[in-house]
Amino acid sequence: MADHRTLANAGVTGYSRYVPVWRLTHASARRAWGTAGARGTRAVAGHDEDPTSMAVEAARRCVRHSAPPEVLYFATATPVYLEKSSATTVHAALGLPSSTAALDCSGATRSGMAALRAAWSEAVAGRRALAVAADVRSGAPGSRDEWAGGDVAAAVEFGGEEILARVLATGSSSLEVLDRWRAPQARHGRSWDERASEQLYVDAAMEAIDIALGAAGLSLGDIAWIGVAGLHQRARSAVTRRLCEAGARAIDDREHELGTPGCAQPAHLVGRGLDGAEAGERLLIVSLADGADTMILEATPDLDRWRRRDRPESPPALEVSYERFLVWRGELQLDAARRPDPDAPAPSPAARNREWKFALTGSRCEDCGTVHLPPGRVCVRCSAVDRMTSHSVRDREGVVVTFQLDYLNASQNPPSMPVVVDFEGGGRLLCELTDADPAAVRIGDRVRMSFRRMSVSPEGVQNYFWKARPVGAAKESWEEGTHA
């Protein structure tokens, strides 16, 4: 495949990641099936999370600190919808203008690198573009895919101003190989013996690397950092060893703690690599999936300036039991609560109220300043009619003024925790608290809003809205994110 060279004024202008707070230990997953224990953990999406909600959390950091992207690409190998776009849900939750194109790259692990390359191509053409990738990885109970996968989302923004890393070149080698697949209606993927395709992947990787190096006028000795993504463990290890023998250092992607994030891994490696790179150092990102794709980046002095910002400390992760993990993944069914099933969202009201439902945008009275959540036409304080301006609270912190621990309500993670939140700048909202230890919740706790899946109807309709999340956990969701 032909290589692509970058223009001098196009590159990475921001990046961020979202890592769920929940962790499953490898030992607990394997102990349940009587197999030998293993060190390490994996990141686990909560019962109210999916690739779409995770993508929103990863992308929020990027869009908060810059002009809205003109193009949004969303990549996932585990989409919640077929035929319907999930990128438009991400677009709506971010509050982007309707003129922003929202496009899906989904259904294959290779989609992660496809989104990065598509977004970079938009930047070369002079348009701001955001690539976000997310996967919820799982496998059959007891399988390696189950305990070695990881649920992570990552976003990379490309543009032409205040560039953190320039893209020097890309390369590809496409390969038709049946090493991993999942039928459209299957719950879990299947894979063939990795030994049968290991050398095929190594050869494809070296071809794609040679193409990119040739386009950039570089040799392997000019590369300081390398990151190899992919679900083929043997090929990843072989390619990593070969590249490290040339003097490059492997990017620490925290796989021992987070697991292998599938489609999100290339973008995740870009962020992790830029976290440790110095100005002038070059990074080589390799993605192994039905062939190989590569991208070479060079860090700029702007990267260090923005990386020196104060960063919040990540709070301790919350451990989830293997039994509860199986419930969240739908492998086990709990006894139904003695309560009515939640109503499925109706298309027409959801469309009419999309700014509230997806972007958490209320209204503020122009006469007295009262904030209304949800938005209204008549002010509850001064009775002014149609004197409202839009007012979003999705990026504002709030304070818990009262809460309840509800053990009777239907929940895959009991108890459910309804809270009343007062926001900075005005506004009060009754919502649900998530990612919190029930024993640690207190009045006065600071929270930030998080986009979540509230329920799924029998027809497969995903009902999204916003929940409150403790500020410590909310800061981990933008873990070490950097933006220019």
Image: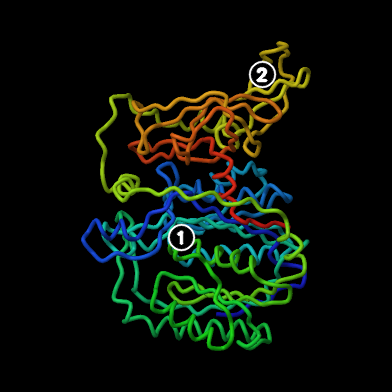
Where residue 473 appears, x then y in whole percent?
A: 54, 45
Quadrant in the rendering for residue 38: bottom left
- Label 2, residues with CA under 10 Å away: few <14, some 14-19, many ≥20: some
Helix, strand or loop at label 2? It is loop
Q: Is residue 147 found left or right of 371 in the rendered image? A: left
Q: How many marks?
A: 2
Image quadrant occupied by the C terminus: bottom right
Q: Residue at x 70, y 69 (%)?
A: 165
Q: Residue at x 57, y 74 (%)?
A: 285
Where residue 369 appears, x then y in whole percent?
A: 75, 21
Q: Look at mark 2 in the image and give the residue it sits on.
A: 377
Where residue 106 appears, x then y in whole percent?
A: 47, 58
Q: Look at mark 1 in the image and give the residue it sits on.
A: 258
Image marks 1 and 2: residues in contact by CB distance under 8 Å: no
Helix, strand or loop at label 1? It is helix
Residue type (three-letter) at the residue carrying disc 1: Leu
Residue type (three-letter) at the residue carrying disc 2: Arg
Image quadrant occupied by the N terminus: bottom right
Where residue 248 appears, x then y in whole percent?
A: 59, 82
